[in-house]
Amino acid sequence: MKHEINEQDQAIVVALDGDVDLQSSPEARKVLLECVAKKKPVLVDLSNVGYIDSSGVASLVEGLQTARKAGGNLILVAVSEGAMRVLQLARLDKVFTICDTVEAGLEQVS
């Protein structure tokens, strides 16, 4: 898994690329928590995530919980079909705010 961080005025966009699984989820967790610590809304772009397992989902949930405890927000954007299936199976599509595009996510936080 690779990642790219793009800090904008109103939010931080974290684009994850590749599989988010047991091997890569510790890195995803670290990146998400570092971004959440900056006290800005975090948008997680999952458009290039082909596969996400329970450890990857746990990293997203921990990021969301940490953001909410700090009074912030973590929004999922451009979720790939494979990742969305996993989120729906776990019923997490009802827990996370999910936007179709990065632009829609930025509008949500502005």
Image (cartoon, grey):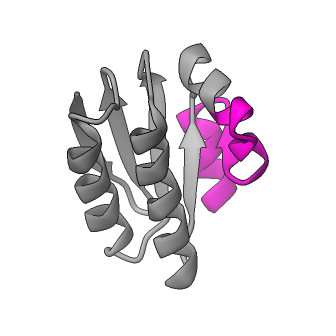
Which of these two is toward me, 73 or 101?
A: 73
- Residue 11 shown left or right of residue 28 in the figure: right
Taking the spot 45% from the left edge, 31% from the top edge, the residue there is 53
Q: Which residue lies furthest to the bottom in this view?
A: 70
Which of these two is toward me, 82 or 75?
A: 82
Q: Name the image quarter holding residue 52.
A: top left
Q: Name the image quarter holding residue 85.
A: top right
Verify whether residue 36 appears in magenta. no
Taking the spot 26% from the left edge, 66% from the top edge, the residue there is 34
- Residue 34 shown left or right of residue 93 in the figure: left
Which of these two is toward me, 96 or 86?
A: 86
Quadrant (top left/top right/bottom left/bottom right) for the C terminus: bottom right
- Above/below status of 72 relative to 34: below
Residue 16: x %, y % from top left: 34, 33
Residue 73: x %, y % from top left: 57, 66
Taking the spot 71% from the left edge, 31% from the top edge, the residue there is 89
- Above/below status of 19 relative to 29: above
Taking the spot 58% from the left edge, 75% from the top edge, the residue there is 68
Residue 46: x %, y % from top left: 47, 30
Q: Name the image quarter holding residue 39.
A: bottom left
Residue 94: x %, y % from top left: 79, 47
Verify whether residue 107 appears in magenta. yes
Numbered range of the magenta stretch: 87-110
